[in-house]
C-alpha cells in the first residue's frame, strides 16, 4: 500500500455553493444575502465602525487629554545610581547605557536629585533638575550639558 492509494474521506470535498441559480439550488432568490440593505447590494458595504445607526463606540467613549506631537521625552537617572561609577569617572550617555541606567542613546537624558552622591564624577546629560544640581555641586561633581 502506498500513499497514493489512500483516498480522501467521504464528504471531504464538498461542491461549492452556487448562489443565485434558482430556487432548486437552495440558494436562490436572495442568494444568501437576506432582504434589503447595503449588504444586499453589489459593491456596497458599510464603513468601518458603522453599527447600524447606533451611536458608534468611537463616538460613545469620552475624549480626554492632549498629546503634544513634538514633546521632548527624557530618560531619567537618579543621582543615587551614579555611585556605581568609579571616582573621577566621566559619565556620558555611552557609560549610562552600558550600566543599564538608560534604554536608548538617542533620547535625551535628565538627572534627577533623588539620593546622595558619594563619588566625584563628571556627568554629561541634556538636563539637570535643581535638586540634582545642588547635590552634584556640593559633592564636588562636574556638570556638562549635552546639546542635541
Image (spheres, rainbow, N blue to C red):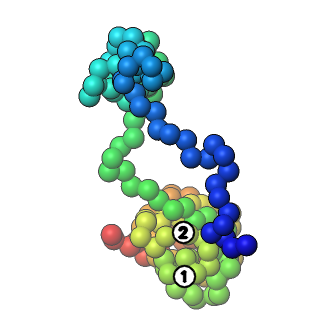
Reading the image, the residue beneath label 1 is: 95
Disc 1 crowd, CA 10 A, few/some/many (<14, 14-19, 20+): some
Could you tell whether 141 is left or right of 74 in the image? right
> In the displayed image of the protein, which residue is found farthest to the right?
1
Could you tell whether 139 is left or right of 125 in the image? right
- Residue 49 placed where, x, y %? 41, 26
Q: Nearer the viewer, residue 65 or 117?
A: 65
Name the residue located 34 percent from the left edge and 13 percent from the top edge. Answer: 37
- Residue 61 placed where, x, y %? 48, 22
Q: Nearer the viewer, residue 120 or 82?
A: 82
Dot 2 lies on which element?
loop
Quarter in which the N terminus is drawn = bottom right
Q: Compare marks 1 and 2 and give the one earlier in the sequence.
A: 1
Between the residue at mark 1 and the residue at mark 2, the CA separation in whole angstroms equals 12 Å
Name the residue located 35 percent from the left edge and 11 percent from the top edge. Answer: 36
- Residue 81 placed where, x, y %? 66, 71
Dot 1 lies on which element?
helix
Quarter in which the C terminus is drawn = bottom left
Please identify, in this view, whether the residue under mark 1 or under mark 2 is nearer the observer: 2
Name the residue located 37 percent from the left edge and 30 percent from the top edge. Answer: 48
Asked where in the image residue 65 lies, by quadrant, the reply is top left
Q: Which mark is residue 103?
A: 2
Name the residue located 41 percent from the left edge and 31 percent from the top edge. Answer: 18
Amino acid at each position: 500500500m502506498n500513499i497514493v492509494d489512500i483516498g480522501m474521506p467521504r464528504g471531504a470535498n464538498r461542491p461549492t455553493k452556487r448562489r443565485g441559480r434558482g430556487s432548486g439550488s437552495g440558494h436562490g432568490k436572495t442568494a444568501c444575502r437576506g432582504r434589503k440593505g447595503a449588504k444586499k447590494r453589489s459593491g456596497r458595504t458599510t464603513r468601518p465602525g458603522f453599527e447600524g445607526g447606533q451611536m458608534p463606540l468611537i463616538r460613545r467613549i469620552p475624549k480626554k487629554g492632549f498629546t503634544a506631537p513634538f514633546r521632548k521625552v527624557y530618560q531619567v537617572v537618579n543621582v543615587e545610581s551614579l555611585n556605581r561609577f568609579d571616582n573621577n569617572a566621566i559619565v556620558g550617555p555611552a557609560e549610562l547605557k552600558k550600566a543599564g541606567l538608560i534604554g536608548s542613546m538617542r533620547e535625551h537624558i535628565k538627572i534627577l536629585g533623588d539620593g546622595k552622591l558619594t563619588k566625584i564624577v563628571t556627568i554629561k546629560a541634556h538636563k539637570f533638575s535643581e535638586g540634582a544640581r545642588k547635590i552634584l555641586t556640593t559633592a564636588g561633581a562636574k556638570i556638562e550639558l549635552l546639546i542635541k
